[in-house]
Amino acid sequence: LAVLTATEITINEQILFKTNRAEIEPVSEETLRAVATILTEHSELNINVEGHTDNRGIRANNLVLSSRRAQAVRDWLVKAGISAARLTSKGFGQDSPVDTNTTEEGRQKNRRVVFRIASGGSGSAKANQK
């Protein structure tokens, strides 16, 4: 479910939220547990939790929503035992798409959370990968 690379912890399943809210869907907790496992096993890592949205809606609102979602993920990881000092969060709104916003599939890919390594990373590891 989660893999440590040289630049980030990649996840195989998107972190899902309630529509237009920063409430994490329970189905995403397994993926978050896999991320927490990697962070526990690699205490040298500091992570930037990045939130992204698609381009539907008002740009300023998307920026706020992505920030709140990134913060919700950070809060979840802290509650799971990861030191808050190792985690930052930032929302990017719709400004960094990885796919087109002209199709539903593309918009879905753009609505994402990224776990970018801020410092301490150089190896690779897997946690609960399916």
Image (spheres, rainbow, N blue to C red):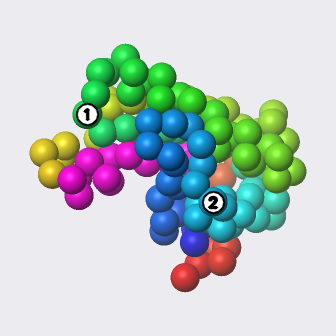
Nearest to the observer: residue 128 or residue 16: 16
How far across and down, in percent of the image, does residue 44 sit?
79, 50
How far across and down, in percent of the image, does residue 100 sit?
18, 47
Is 108 colored magenta in this rendering?
yes
Q: Secondary structure at mark 2?
A: helix
How far across and down, in percent of the image, does residue 112 sit?
43, 48
User: Can residue 9 be seen in this snapshot?
Assistant: no
Q: Which residue is mark 2?
A: 26
Label 1 crowd bin: few (<14), some (14–19), many (20+), radius 10 Å? few
Give the residue furthest to the left: 102
Q: Sequence-wise, which precedes: disc 2 or disc 1?
A: 2
Q: Which residue is mark 1?
A: 56
- The residue sitting at 60% across, 49% down in the picture is 24
- The residue sitting at 82% across, 53% down in the picture is 80
How far across and down, in percent of the image, does residue 35 sit?
67, 60
- The residue sitting at 74% across, 48% down in the picture is 77
Is 12 colored magenta in this rendering?
no
In the rendered structure, which segment of residues is drawn in magenta? 104-116
Give the residue furthest to the top: 60
State the quadrant of the N terminus.
bottom right
- The residue sitting at 83% across, 46% down in the picture is 79
Q: Is residue 46 left or right of residue 3?
A: right
Q: Amino acid at mark 1?
A: Arg
User: Can residue 109 be seen in this snapshot?
Assistant: yes
State the quadrant of the C terminus.
bottom right
Nearest to the observer: residue 64 or residue 95: 64
Q: Secondary structure at mark 1?
A: loop
